[in-house]
Image: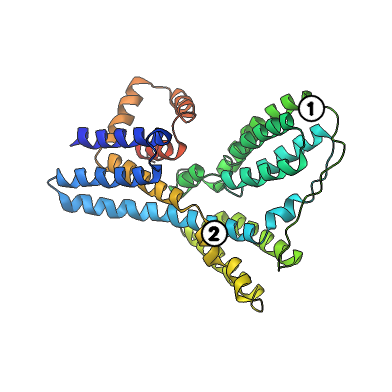
Amino acid sequence: MTTLILSIFILGYAAIAFESRIKVNKSAIALITGTLCWTAFIVLSPDKQRILMALNEHLSDISSILFFLLGAMTIVELIDAHEGFELLTNYIKQKEKWKLLWIIGLLTFFLSSILDNLTTTIVMISLIRKLVPVASDRLKIASIIIIAANAGGAWTPIGDVTTTMLWMGDQITTLNIMKTLFLPSFFCVLTPLVYFSIGMKGSYPSTPQIKTYVTSHSALNKAVVLFTGILILILVPIFKTTTNLPPFMGMLLGLGLLWMLTEIMHLNKPEEVRHLLSVNQALRKIDTPSVLFFLGILLSVASLQTSGILPDIAKTISQSIANEKIVVVFIGLLSSIVDNVPLVAAAQGMYTL
């Protein structure tokens, strides 16, 4: 049984890794892998009731993560629908190359600590396409954006899906991760900023005018939705700390409040405009396949944990490598090749508190 479950997981993960070669979406593969792992587990096990109970327990934890992600994604899409990010980035008018590099890098670093990395990267890449006319400079600044988005997402519990998973699994706390990881994360973005600044001298002849969208809602509405959405995301960890409720409850509360606010805000507008700025439209635009990918991967890893495979692997590693710091470094290096989500999920299953 153990061999079969592990084989299904390895084959499924290999198919995910070679998604571009086999031309099958990784979300579909993840769902199939997760389902087959549990199917093999329950079919070949004599105690089927115990496995069903374990599946329900894991599903409760997994659902908490997915509801949290869905809420956060919807809030971000609502901000984007109201062009809140355009309102934020339109204030950047810097002409000197090295100063613009630092502004973009630091803004990305702090923005990604609140928003997810992908959204932050898309917003900032769109910005430099308008601000930076030189292609070679755009590549350098884009590199900084990628580094800053990942570094910024590491020091808060809501900055990256992996830190959110650890936070919701009670393996990290809000204040501790911020206190412990802010300086290392900041150093990670500071080093390339200094390095790239050396080669970026001079200034651009003129700052290109940023084209603003012509919409039926005012700048005030854009600002209200932008800052309300960001405030909601910031307050979610505080809500968890003060109420002891799971984080997804705070996220759903915030989504409900922002939903109500936007409905009232556009109450007297034409139906077609209200539709484009509604939560219904935002839900259509969120990255649902990624949510389903997380579901499949987390189900797969849960089967490995319940079947005892992950605890056995953890025990073997602990016996072979006594130094936990070496194990952490190895996992970090492995994450440059292997997708972060299943790697963190596996580590959670191997090293439970």
- In the image, taking residue 129 as reference, residue 60 lies left or right, namely left
Q: Is residue 161 left or right of residue 272?
A: left
The picture places residue 67, in percent across and down from the top left corner, at 45, 57
Q: Amino acid at mark 2?
A: Thr
Of all residues shown, which one is farthest toward the bottom?
Answer: 268
Q: Residue 14 appears in which quarter of the rendering?
A: top left
Disc 1 crowd rating (10 Å Cα; few below 14, some 14-19, many 20+) is some
The quadrant of the picture occupied by the N terminus is: top left
Residue 27 point in image, percent of width and height: 39, 46
Q: Residue at x 32, y 37 (%)?
A: 12
Seen in the picture, residue 21 relative to 229 is either above or below; the reply is: above
First in residue order: circle 1 vs circle 2 = 2
Q: Horizontal placement of 287 versus 188: left or right?
A: left
**Residue identified by numbered label 1:** 200
Q: Is residue 113 visible?
A: no
Q: Secondary structure at mark 1?
A: loop
Q: Which residue is mark 2?
A: 74
- Residue type at tag 1: Met
Q: 252 or 273: which is nearer to us?
A: 273
The quadrant of the rendering that contains the C terminus is: top left
Instruction: Name the spot of residue 225 as percent of width and height, x first.
Output: 66, 63
Instruction: Determine if residue 200 is in view.
Output: yes
Quarter assignment of residue 118: top right
Asked if residue 276 is positioned above or below residue 154 in the image, the reply reads below
Nearest to the observer: residue 60 or residue 6: 6
Identify the residue at image location x=68%, y=45%: 126
State the image coordinates of residue 310 (x, y, percent, origin top left): 31, 35
